Amino acid sequence: MKNKTKNILITGAAGFIASNFLNYWVKKYPEDKIIALDILSYASNINSIKSLIDRQSIHFYKGDISDQYILDEIFDNFAINYVINFAAETHVDRSISSPSIFLNTNVLGTYFLLECFKKYWEKNNKPNNWRFLHISTDEVFGSLPNDPSIKFTEETPYNPRSPYSASKASSDHLVRAWHETYQLPVVLTNCSNNYGPYHFPEKLIPLVILNALSEKPLPIYGDGSNIRDWLYVEDHADALLLVLEKGALGRSYNIGGENERTNLELVTTICGILDRLHPYEKGHYADLITFVLDRPGHDVRYAIDPSRIRSELGWRPSVTVEEGLERTVKWYLANEDWWRPLVSRSGVGQRLGTKI
């Protein structure tokens, strides 16, 4: 499929996963025309893609995916034939306190984007080489028991348990419905927890790194036994590119890191890396670990079975969680100019719970 220049709209472009994907794509295919759209909400950071904008490697639009006028302008001016939809509100904690914005962005925004893509796809006689890639999460599947033999597959029934995961499940259903009803050329992915450079510091890994550097408490929900599968974001970018180029239309692919860890194990590993790379004068960073009351509806375990993407597309993650965490810690130590302006934003450095 990689035989001619693409005109690509990437939504949520200044967010964590999208900015890493953009940097990955531009290095691999510098000839492609990329339009980056982002509303620049609290979790976006234009500095994550500023070098690409400055080099004119991408064209940046500030705007909302629900704004039909902006979408029409972009499709008209740049003859878009690929859409990669990263745009989403993603933080579970915030969805519990403010669910409406999650519905507006994740559900209605996806609808408007699908409709715009459909309009121009039909206007151009439904070319079979156009693509709409929708990025989603494993949280739509609900919670798993603490049994390593049980994992999420693409056939696992949806069972969202937070306003965030419910909104993402709704957007997934819309994308599938537009494929089944209108034959829109879509592919979908559901990924496990990402981590790496450019991660907004309300999420667990950057929160722990930056709190530790500031000698603040390292909050962990409950007893720290909740389990997640951790996917290094550059591995995710590699998988997304493969799905976009070779994935079957209408099909979904689970993308996992094959790196399950409890939250306590994860935080302890980060503390050990920091002890070695940036020693704590008052002792060990693990001394700062503080257990806080669990958040409502906290899922016990997520784990992805990546058999489909491995067998059909030949992809496997290349980075272990220990390797990825060390890369991530080193990145934050070397890029204070990126994260320092963010720490004053609302919610950064906090968990919903209070100290036990």
Image (cartoon, rainbow, N blue to C red):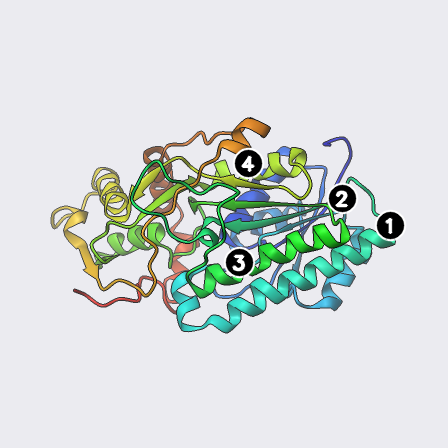
Height in image: 65 above or below 4? below
Residue 59: percent from left, percent from top: 69, 52
Query: Residue at the spot x=49%, y=62% of the render?
Result: 166
Ranked by sequence position, the earlier of labels 1 and 2 is 1
Q: CA distance from mark 3 to mark 1?
A: 29 Å
Q: How many residues crowd mark 1 within 10 Å: few (<14), some (14–19), many (20+)?
A: few
Q: Quadrant of the N terminus?
A: top right
Q: Could you say which quadrant of the image residue 329 lies in?
A: top left
Location of mark 4 (residue): 239
Considering the numbered disc 2 on the image, is that residue within a helix, a strand or a loop? Answer: loop
Tell me if I can see residue 12 in this picture.
no
Q: CA distance from mark 2 to mark 3?
A: 23 Å
Q: Amino acid at mark 2?
A: Trp
Ranked by sequence position, the earlier of labels 4 and 1 is 1
Q: CA distance from mark 3 to mark 4?
A: 20 Å
Location of mark 2 (residue): 130
Location of mark 1 (residue): 124
Relative side of 89 to 71, left or right:
left
Q: CA distance from mark 2 to mark 4?
A: 19 Å
Q: Nearer the viewer, mark 3 or mark 1?
A: 3
Location of mark 3 (residue): 168
Query: Residue at the spot x=19%, y=43% of the render?
Result: 279
Q: Amino acid at mark 3?
A: Lys
Residue 314: percent from left, percent from top: 55, 26
Q: How many residues crowd mark 3 within 10 Å: few (<14), some (14–19), many (20+)?
A: many
- Asked if disc 1 and disc 2 are in contact, CB closer than 8 Å, the reply is yes
Which of the pair 243/15 is nearer the observer?
243
Height in image: 300 above or below 128? below
Relative side of 277 to 255, left or right:
left
Q: Amino acid at mark 4?
A: Ala
Which of the pair 238/145 is nearer the observer?
145
